[in-house]
């Protein structure tokens, strides 16, 4: 005899209605599996069940299940909120319970309805792929830590060893920076550190991809600047240190080591030989103000000075060396490094983009009724001029500047600035450009990427494919790896565009022909592309789809960024880092305090492991799940 509570549930008229609804959803899962039968068959053996489960999950998410979830929960049943890794098994379990409650004899389950994975095998497949791709998780946490390498990692074994000891599981090398020589030394340092520590840190190399950026700016000056630290009353607290050297102003290019300095002024050897400790060096800055530098240290190749005032010094500024009130030598400042002056933009300003990326930015006279100085700057992707259309939005510098395209010509584009935040915004060279509503029609791999892939195939454990937009991008990379005899190299798909997100289900199905594969939620560009207000829900959907495809996820971009750069985290980014426990890996970017950031993140992930694994979800209808095999590119 059933207990009273269960007996009441069994008598509920909802039982039959719920059974009918759930069986209808099950039929849609099986129908979609049949529709994508060819794609399932093309998946690699390790991922075939993952593609099946992903298809089942997509079929479920073509419905709004929130009301159904509430009715199931009101009966004390599973609300299907955690079925990502075993979608059909979750449905079958609830159907079985409802059939039992209804008193009906459950029919024999046809073989075609047998779930491809269950509550154990689904998570196990995901864990196995994560281990194969990213390496085993360290004791005490189920989430790995990835760290982007700064340039100094090439020459500092201590830095790399310290990061691995602190908890780094994956070293990320960005092919958009440094050279093959530096990359090779970074990875060699990692292998040595692994050997000494007994760790298994892996190397991911990110291909740069077709990043759209602003071109060069020729407006600026050859200048150095130093500042003086003062207290609230204006008294000097910290005096800047200025190094006078012979011939070259680049501290990194100096043939002999220089003492720590805030600025470097090249001058003549005669000036250096004549100087003594206590001498005064007089110079006039760019504003016509006289400055006095006091020599506090002298070697055969450098004079170290201090100054009581801030200054901007230009190339060829006159120098005089004074002792006891008398000038004993004179000279001039040598050639100083060029410092670009960014373009200053305000709301309603016009900005002209030009196709010629060799043309540095400059100011030109506007044509037509709106007279005045109009900024002009090139961009690095010529395809933008044939793909963009008037009326489409455009963003610069990670979304700090928003514009609207007003006019497009074969070699130029006129943009009206519509948002700059508070006051003016500054736009420099090498800043990112996003066209979220423009299909640029370019693949994810450039000629540089194909060249870099030769090195990556020989030295890396994993390759990152940037700006993935469509399934063909993945198949192209798979082909390039196979031609290099590296068909088994791990692949990470970086989702950082609106098109990449919209095409994610089909792209995942294509990617799962390969093993192992993972997904990086590249939240920087992605936030600009989909809108900051939508970022939270989009990253949730990527997490759901990835778990359904048993594909490990890397939670990336600006995690603990303030801590890594300044040594002190913000409250918001601590919470963000804690939520990384829902992924298989969390990525930290480089910064002066990166070692502290790795220690901090390791501690957070250890503590959060006892509180949360993934999360329960409300299953509204997903737009990204509305796919059909007829819309898939050939071979998907």
Image (cartoon, rainbow, N blue to C red):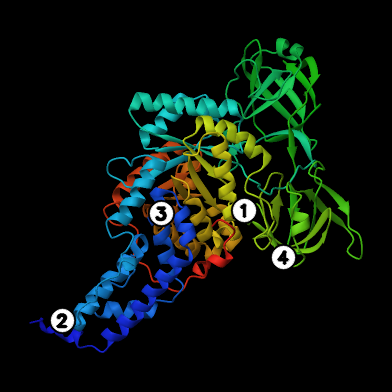
Query: Can you tell which of label 3 and label 4 is closer to the viewer?
Result: 3
> Sequence-wise, which precedes: disc 3 or disc 4?
3
Q: CA distance from mark 1 to mark 4?
A: 17 Å
Q: Which residue bears the numbered disc 2?
A: 6
Q: CA distance from mark 2 to mark 3?
A: 39 Å
Residue 433 higher or lower than 60, as above or below = above
Q: CA distance from mark 3 to mark 4?
A: 40 Å
Residue 332 higher or lower than 166, as above or below = above
Q: Which residue bears the numbered disc 3?
A: 48
Q: Which residue bears the numbered disc 4?
A: 392
Which residue of the protein is positioned furthest toward the right in this rendering?
A: 368
Does residue 434 appear to the left or right of 101 in the view shown? Answer: right
Query: Can you tell which of label 3 and label 1 is closer to the viewer?
Result: 3
| SS assignment at label 3 | helix
Marker disc for residue 398: 1
Query: Can you tell which of label 2 and label 4 is closer to the viewer?
Result: 2
| SS assignment at label 1 | loop
Asked whether the beta carbons under mark 2 and mark 3 sit within 8 Å of each other, the answer is no
> Sequence-wise, which precedes: disc 2 or disc 3?
2
Q: How far from the left and from the top, in percent, is residue 325?
A: 75, 18
Does residue 304 appear to the left or right of 160 in the view shown? Answer: right
Q: CA distance from mark 1 to mark 2?
A: 56 Å
> Sequence-wise, which precedes: disc 3 or disc 1?
3
Quadrant that contains the C terminus: bottom right
Quadrant that contains the N terminus: bottom left
Query: Can you tell which of label 1 and label 2 is closer to the viewer?
Result: 2
Query: Can you tell which of label 2 and label 3 is closer to the viewer?
Result: 3
């Amino acid at each position: 005899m059933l207990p009273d509570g269960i007996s009441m549930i069994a008598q509920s008229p909802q039982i039959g209605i719920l059974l009918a609804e759930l069986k209808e959803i099950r039929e849609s899962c099986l129908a979609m599996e049949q529709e994508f039968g060819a794609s399932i068959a093309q998946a690699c053996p390790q991922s075939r069940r993952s593609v099946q489960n992903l298809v089942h999950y997509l079929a479920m998410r073509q419905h709004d299940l929130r009301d159904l979830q509430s009715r199931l929960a009101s009966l004390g049943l599973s609300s299907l909120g955690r079925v990502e890794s075993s979608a059909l098994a979750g449905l079958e379990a609830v159907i079985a319970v409802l059939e039992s409650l209804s008193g009906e004899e459950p029919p024999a389950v046809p073989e075609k309805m047998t779930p491809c994975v269950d509550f154990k095998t689904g998570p196990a497949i995901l864990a196995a792929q994560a281990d194969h791709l990213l390496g085993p998780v360290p004791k005490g946490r189920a989430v790995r830590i990835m760290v982007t390498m700064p340039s100094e990692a090439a020459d500092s074994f201590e830095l790399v060893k310290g990061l691995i000891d602190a908890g780094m599981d994956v070293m990320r090398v960005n092919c958009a920076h440094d050279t093959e020589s530096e990359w090779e030394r970074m990875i060699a340092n990692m292998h040595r550190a692994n050997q000494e520590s007994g760790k298994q840190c892996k190397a991911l190399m990110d291909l740069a991809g077709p990043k759209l950026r602003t071109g060069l700016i020729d407006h600026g000056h050859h200048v150095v600047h130093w500042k003086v630290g003062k207290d609230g009353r204006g008294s000097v607290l910290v005096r800047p240190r200025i190094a006078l050297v012979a011939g070259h102003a680049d501290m990194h290019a100096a043939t002999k080591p220089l003492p720590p300095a805030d600025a470097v002024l090249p001058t003549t050897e005669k000036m250096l030989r004549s100087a003594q400790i206590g001498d005064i060096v007089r110079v006039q800055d760019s504003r016509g103000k006289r400055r006095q530098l006091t020599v506090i240290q002298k070697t055969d190749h450098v004079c170290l000075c201090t100054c009581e005032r801030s200054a901007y010094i230009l190339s060829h500024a006159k120098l005089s060396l004074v002792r006891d009130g008398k000038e004993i030598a004179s000279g001039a400042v040598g050639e100083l490094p060029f410092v670009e002056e960014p373009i200053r933009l305000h709301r309603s300003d016009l900005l002209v983009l030009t196709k010629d990326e060799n043309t540095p930015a400059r100011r030109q006279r506007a044509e037509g009724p709106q007279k005045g100085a109009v900024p002009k700057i090139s961009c690095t992707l010529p395809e933008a001029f044939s793909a963009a259309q008037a009326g489409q939005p455009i963003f610069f510098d990670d979304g700090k500047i928003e514009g609207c395209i007003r006019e497009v010509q074969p070699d130029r584009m006129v943009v009206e600035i519509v948002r700059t935040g508070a006051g003016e915004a500054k736009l420099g060279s090498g800043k990112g450009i996003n066209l979220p509503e423009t299909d640029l029609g370019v693949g994810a791999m450039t000629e540089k990427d194909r060249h870099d892939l030769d090195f990556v195939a020989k030295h890396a454990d994993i390759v990152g494919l940037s700006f993935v937009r469509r399934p063909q991008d993945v198949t192209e990379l798979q082909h390039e790896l196979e031609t290099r005899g590296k068909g088994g190299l791990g692949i990470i798909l970086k989702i950082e565009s609106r098109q990449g997100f919209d095409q994610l289900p089909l792209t995942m199905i294509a990617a799962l022909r390969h093993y192992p594969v993972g997904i990086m939620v590249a939240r920087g560009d992605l936030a600009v592309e989909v809108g900051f207000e939508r970022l939270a829900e989009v990253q949730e959907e990527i997490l759901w789809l990835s778990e359904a495809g048993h594909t490990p996820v890397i939670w990336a971009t600006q995690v603990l960024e303030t801590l890594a750069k300044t040594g002190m985290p913000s409250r918001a980014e601590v919470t963000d880092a804690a939520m990384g426990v829902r992924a298989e890996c969390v990525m930290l970017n480089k910064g002066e305090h990166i070692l502290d950031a790795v220690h901090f993140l390791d501690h957070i992930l250890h503590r959060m492991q006892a509180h949360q694994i993934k999360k329960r979800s409300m299953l509204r209808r997903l737009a990204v799940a509305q796919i059909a095999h007829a819309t898939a590119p050939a071979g998907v």
